[in-house]
Image (spheres, helix red, strand yellow):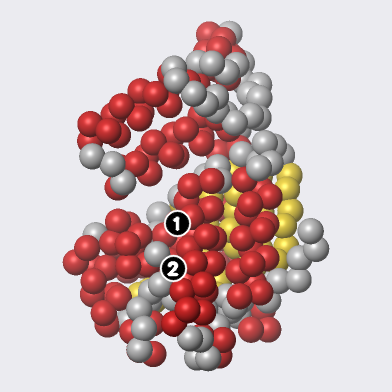
Amino acid sequence: MEHRNLRVESEAGVATVTLDRPERLNILGREVLVELDAALRTLAADEACRSLVFRSSSEKGFTAGADIREMGALTAAEARAYAALGHSVANRLERELPPVVMAANGFVMGGGVELACACDFRIASEDAVFAQPEINIGIFPGWGGSQRLARVIGLPRARELILTGRRVSAQEALGLGLVHAVVPREELHGRAQALAKELASKSRPALLAAKRAVNNVSEMPLAAGLEDEQQRWALLFGGEDPREGMAAFLERREPRFRTAEPPEGPA
């Protein structure tokens, strides 16, 4: 698929998706969301993909958020469809892909924060600024922000940021738990790639199973989550990677993992 607003590259198990509309600070209009959704769907089905870096080509920022010009003309029904598209992108990042590392620089506004909360790791440059400013234009976060932000930084802090729309510096975001690390701007993409490369050295089935099990913490009661963990853990033994990983450990060598989906069905 040809990309107009993105760049998609893959090397040694690491996919890199770059928002590439710098002249508009990567505004997330419908065209961009459709393209991003399709790219992520393709990568989710690619068994060679074991980790993903989500980044921006703009020096000014990751994204200015949703396209306000587009949103200003929406009917309620059209707004529902627009929200569904943003949710689809966030859901793919959170549920369908191997671990996703977001590299956040400059402005990370609105929908950018919502997509960030759907990623597994968030690394920010020192100049990064985060905000959910939707309240200032008469709406609120509609791509999962009202739910995921609270799960990432806690309900009281999420309530404050969503209801006030105030901006948060990279260092404050680190203190809130919104990002995992803050690095100099020139080190941002190297740090994100290094983490993604480390993740890509591991078993894809184990990465996917672990990610899905951990996501259940916020979605299932404890008893159901523990049952799901047992099921996913046992199903991994239907594949080759556990035996290869354990043999490599005992033989003191690097494992040679396959790149396949975890087995499905009852253990």
Which of the 4 quarters of the picture holds residue 160? Answer: bottom left
Q: Are marks 1 and 2 in contact (CB under 8 Å)?
A: no
Residue sitting at x 53%, y 46%: 96
* Residue 266 left/right relative to 250: left
The residue indicated by pointer 1 is 118
Question: How far apart are labels 1 and 2 at the CA level?
Answer: 10 Å
Residue 125, visible in the rendered structure? no
Q: Nearer the viewer, residue 114 or 126?
A: 114
Residue 100, visible in the rendered structure? yes
- Give the percent coordinates (x, y) of residue 199: 55, 38
- Give the percent coordinates (x, y) of residue 232: 43, 26
- Give the percent coordinates (x, y) of residue 88: 52, 60
Of the residues tagged 1 and 2, which is closer to the observer? 2
Q: Quadrant of the N terminus?
A: bottom right
State the residue lying farthest toward the left: 156
Residue 218: which disc?
A: none
Vertical side of 198 occupied by 18: above or below: below
Q: Nearer the viewer, residue 108 or 175?
A: 108
Vertical side of 124 occupied by 191: above or below: above
* Residue 159 left/right relative to 56: left
Q: Secondary structure at mark 2?
A: loop
Residue sitting at x 67%, y 65%: 35
Among numbered discs 1 and 2, the one appearing first in the sequence: 1
Q: Nearer the viewer, residue 267 or 122?
A: 267
Q: Looking at numbered disc 1 in the image, what kind of residue is underneath it?
A: Ala
Q: Secondary structure at mark 1?
A: helix
- Give the percent coordinates (x, y) of residue 62: 55, 71
The residue indicated by pointer 2 is 143
Callout 2 crowding tier (Cα within 10 Å): few <14, some 14–19, many ≥20 = many
Vertical side of 49 occupied by 149: above or below: below
Residue sitting at x 57%, y 18%: 239
Residue sitting at x 27%, y 82%: 164
